[in-house]
Amino acid sequence: MVIKTGFVGKYQHNLDDKNRVSLPAKIKKYIEEVASSPEYGERIMLTKGPDNCIEGFMVSDWQSMAEKVQSNMSFKRNPEDEELEEIAMNADQVSIDKSGRIMINADLKKHAGLNKSAVFVGAIDRFRIWNPDKLAEKYNGR
């Protein structure tokens, strides 16, 4: 039985010259275990997150969020439309390669200020990827 703990923990990994970074083993395992179908365990969604981080979602969770948005669609523009547009505009579906790595596109890498190192932080329903210095600054070294 899989216990759905969500994304938890903090892990630091290095980016290679091709902007690939290994998913932390616990995050990768969680994605594989709770994905609703095998193909969902091989891909994730990345988008710009708050405070200059990158947010990562399981494809199945992203699909559920998209379905909720679509069920509430109307011709009238509402305040959340701009935020949703920015999230969708910056989203990138990425594959997890056989070595457990993902590639971070140039726009997301720039947004997060990533160089050689990235810190993955669990946030229950998503994970975040941070520049180590920005993360330390945000949480005062915690």
Image: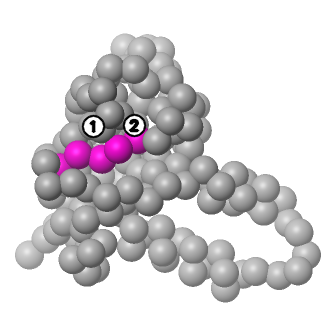
Provide residue 108's location: percent of width, then percent of height.
Answer: 52, 38
The disc at residue 21 is 1
Residue 103 sits inside the magenta stretch: yes
The residue nearer to you, when weighing 72 against 142, is 72
Question: Coloured how?
Answer: one colour
* Nearer the observer, 33 or 97: 97
Q: Residue 113, relative to residue 38: is it above or below?
A: above
Which residue of the protein is positioned furthest toward the right in this rendering?
Answer: 76
Kindly identify which numbered label has been placed on residue 129. 2
Residue at 47% from the left image edge and 19% from the top image edge: 134
Give the residue at the far bottom of this rendering.
71
Q: CA distance from mark 2 to mark 1?
A: 10 Å
Is residue 16 in view?
A: yes
The local secondary structure at tag 1 comes to strand
Which numbered mark, 2 or 1, is in the foreground of this view? 1
| Residue 12 can be seen in this image | no
91 versus 38 height, above or below:
above
| Residue drawn where x is 56% and y is 37% of the image | 107
Q: Secondary structure at mark 2?
A: strand
| Lateral position of residue 122 relative to residue 45, left or right | left
Q: Which residues are magenta?
A: 100-104
Q: Is residue 126 left or right of residue 84?
A: left
- Say which quadrant the C terminus sits in: top left
Q: Where residue 59 appears, x then y in whole percent?
A: 39, 68
